[in-house]
Image: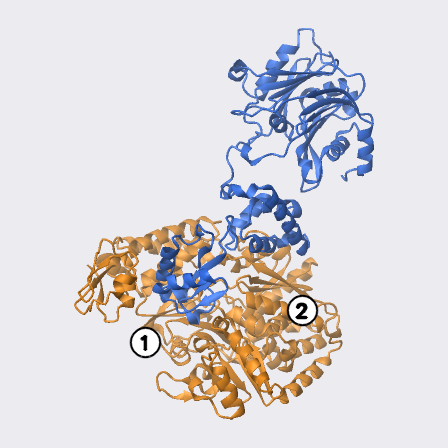
Amino acid sequence: MPAPPSTDVSRMRQAHKVLARFDFEPVRLERGYANRCLRIDLTKGSFEIRPVTQQMKDLWVGGKGFDLWLMFQEISKTTRWDSPENPICMSSGPLGGTLSFPGSGKTLVTAVSPLTHSIMDCNVGGYFGPYLKFAGFDALVLTGKAKADVIVFIDAVERRVTIEEAPLESVDSHLAAEEFTEMYAADELDKKNVAVVSAGRAAEHSRIGLLNFSFYDWRRKVARLKQAGRGGIGTVFRNKKLKALVLRSRPISHGWRVSESKAAMRIPKSDHCGPCEEATKTLVRDVVKRWNKDPEYVIEMLQDIQERQRHISQAAVDALALETGVSRGQLYHIATFYKAFSLTPRGEKTVQVCVGTACHVKGAARILEAFERELGVKQGETTKDGKFTLEAVACLGCCSLAPVVKVGETVHGNVKAQDAARILKKEAAS
Amino acid sequence: MIATLLDLDSISAKVRDEQKKYKAMLMVCTGTGCVSAKGFDIRDSLKAEIRARGLEKDYLVVGTGCNGFCAVGPIVVVQPEGVFYQKVGAADVKAIVQDHLIGKKVVAKLLYKDPVSGKSHEKMTDIPFFSKQQLVALRNKGLIDPEDVEHYIARGGYQALRRLLKENQPERIVEDVILSGLRGRGGGGFPTGVKWKAGRKAALERGEPVYVVCNADEGDPGAFMDRSIIETDPHSVLEGMLIGAFAVGAREGFVYIRKEYPLALVRLEKALTDARAHNLLGQDILGTKFSFDVKIHRGAGAFVCGESSALMASMSGQAGEPRAKYVHNVEFGYRDKPTILNNVETWANLPPIFEKGPKWFASLGTNDPKLAPPDPWAGSSGTKVFSLVGDIRNTGLVEVPMGITLREIIEDVGGGVPDGKKFKAVQTGGPSGGCIPASLLDMKVDFDSLTEAGSMMGSGGMIVMDEDTCMVDVARYFVHFLVDESCGKCAPCREGLHALDRTLTRICAGEGKEDDLKLLEDLASTVNAASLCQLGGTAGNPVLSTLRWFREEYEEHIRHKKCRAHVCKPLLRFDIVDACTGCTLCAKNCPTKAIAGERKALHRIDQAKCIQCGVCADVCKFDAVTVRTGG
């Protein structure tokens, strides 16, 4: 599904009229909670921040629990599905948005159902729930009814919530998701930070309307949809004259993860500085271009990056994933599978002690030990001053000179254990 | 640009005429071995010297690929007379120009001297290292500039391709390859023609494209045949691929080459560029309807990528993990299309097969001459290139006919074991090959005999080991190498090798148990039987073959805590004896300061601090450091 031309999107945005506006303060997440909920009343155009109490956490733990608790605050025994006070509640539990557990990206949604006339819950994927938490809200309550079609825009970047009249955008989810993603993302990379909730025209005419939660699939370059399907909550959504609920998230920091993957943990934190990330992105773009964006050549691309930066940084993997469409997991798999790559920076010069068979029978093990002693590092490690990386390699192909040590581009042949210090001194000076 | 089939001849004639104008050509070896010993510097200073004397019209300096005799590099050969100069240093350049080129006198001190007879040999062909060799794949070594396609054409290059294109009978080419008895030089020894036939058939039946791939991911330590062939004669490989592509109907080919081979990579890229410029690659090759091009994929250092299915995974930009063998690459290979994968040496053998005929090729080697056409699986045709390294005088690259005995290779070509040491074993077939003891030296070298002896041909690494080599340590070394290189996909290889490594390390540390040998045998044969790919399927070989031929060394390690080769450090004890003159050299060099003693007084080693590194024994000029082992 190609995104509509951007001029259309800017025209649509110009037609917006802000009906109500609310600024909020950031909070630090603590043990999985932001400790506050956001309540939006569409009839009054009002906003309210409510605390999450310890009692809620103890007795109503989880997304479904919070939603139900909040429902009980809003409804009475006369509340029907189309009553203005019927709230749509959305929440993800304390694990929401962590990368450590399956299902922790889910959002739980509740409302009084037009199908069963009772409280209905359903769960949905997409990015909305986690982004809501990152924006600083454990749950969202949408209540009231708007006069004309509106959108609710939660902007976690500007820390502002608005209710806006939005007459030109599509109602149908597959179009709306594309339009709002395009509208609110700063650039292609930012699109994954936009989550759109919408219901579609069918929800206006039936009681089984569902909610579509979008997430931007950067590999296919489309906003894809996940459904909160049970009980017709989409019908409630449209009944409130909501066209869309849009959330723009700040780019997620790495600090949020409960635990990193093993490969990622080996990357030094210094990698995350802004300017060098920019340089990395430029380098990666150049490299990818040189290999015609062909994913079959990612190994060659990684080789070029390794050569230029002496390691494969997390920024490089991220950028390469974006440029080639090869997943980060796959790239880490490659970068840790092949010996040519290192996730930590290698030294200015690499000391390659050949331990190939020919060198082995001529005493390479002792030579390697001598270099380990002299450099104070084990094979595969880099000296503290960043000058040398010591490597044991299988064969340098000049077996006639065995045992062989290659420092940088210089080959030293017929090396003896006691030569290590002399060779290193000479190489450090040159 | 060669527009028609005939232009090859005019290029060939032109180059030969040009070369005739020179009084002599100086062929300077610039293979990796000689380059490591400053071969490029020698080439450049020879050129400079000749230019300085205004002789550049009479003498041409050519940088060639590997000459093969790496032990005595850098090498300069003066052609056409064939005078062979060895170990040429920067200081010798003047002497070659002054004495040989101007004075017409051979520079005696640079000649090869037979270490046994002490006789000097003037001509290359007189040196025993060269005289027993028979060159097919390496036919152009030392005779052409690998970076000049016209040199290759002048030596008859691309003539075979031209004839085959003209005849336009691709099926016949496949039949001829079968007839030649050529078997894959990469290790498995699968009949090349049979493979081609299957690939051609699969492509025709499914109506899909077919690819040809050259495997230049030479990962075996101590083996550098493939690299040398590409560095020496890249067009020979390319012509082979072209013939193969034409025979099976491929339009695209790939070379998968290790990035660790920078020189080979440069020469290969140059060869591709030149071939395209000469209409030998690309659209309508040599004016025919045949179109074919070759791309390069660079490997990133994984031994397992030499395995065919892992190689194709790597070519597709994935981690090089093999898959089960019941899916044949020849039917579902690269991009799930029929793929013909052959090793560098196999491809380089093809042009001569079609220059001289498949029957000529079949007559070399160990084929049964009574069988016509020969059974592709019986016997071994042609020659094989070996890299002869380790404890041997003439290390280097040799090409010998199949069926030659190990003794001829090691003693005649290789010059035997140096320094008066005794020969112990020769290891063939790379890390998953096996060790062959002295008692089998008269064995014929071909695919089947080597397998019978518990080793394998492999890609052609031949590592000679003298009595200072501990066979338990060798087994541990190879297993350790394979532990590192196992891709980890299947359990027998991943876990079995670890278990082998642990047990062997224990034995080498003097903590072996009596029933360890049974355990090793069980583990190694299970690894061989149950692994997914051939890397694991042969990974037990180093253990099994050393157990088979050198069992007593294992027993000594376990029962007597003795390492007769003085390799396994925990089993050694260093002492200083009365011969010590108190020169303090050992104390100065000891990395752990374990040696104490006054100047001019007997030194002592503090056994608690000693790490058995052996530096003291190396530096001692009076043989005062002794090594004891065995309790």
Judged from the image, the secondary structure of the residue bearing numbered disc 1 is loop
Residue A189 image point, x, y percent: 67, 40
Q: Check disc 2: other Cα within 10 Å, few if <14, some if 14-19, many if 20+.
A: some
Please report the residue visible at 46 percent of the width from the left and 56 percent of the height from the top.
A388
> Callout 2, which amino acid?
Thr
The residue that disc 1 covers is: B419
Instruction: Specify the chain shown as blue.
Output: A
* Chain letter behind tag 2: B
- Residue B225: horizontal and vertical position, in percent? 50, 70
* Disc 2 with disc 1 on a shared chain: yes
* Residue B393 position by quadrant: bottom left
Q: Which mark is residue B538?
A: none
Residue B524 position by quadrant: bottom left
Within-10-Å neighbours for mark 1: few <14, some 14–19, many 20+: few
Quarter of the image that includes the C terminus of chain B: bottom left
Q: According to the colouring, which chain is orange?
A: B
> In the image, residue B560 lies at what x, y percent?
21, 59
Q: Amino acid under label 1?
A: Asp
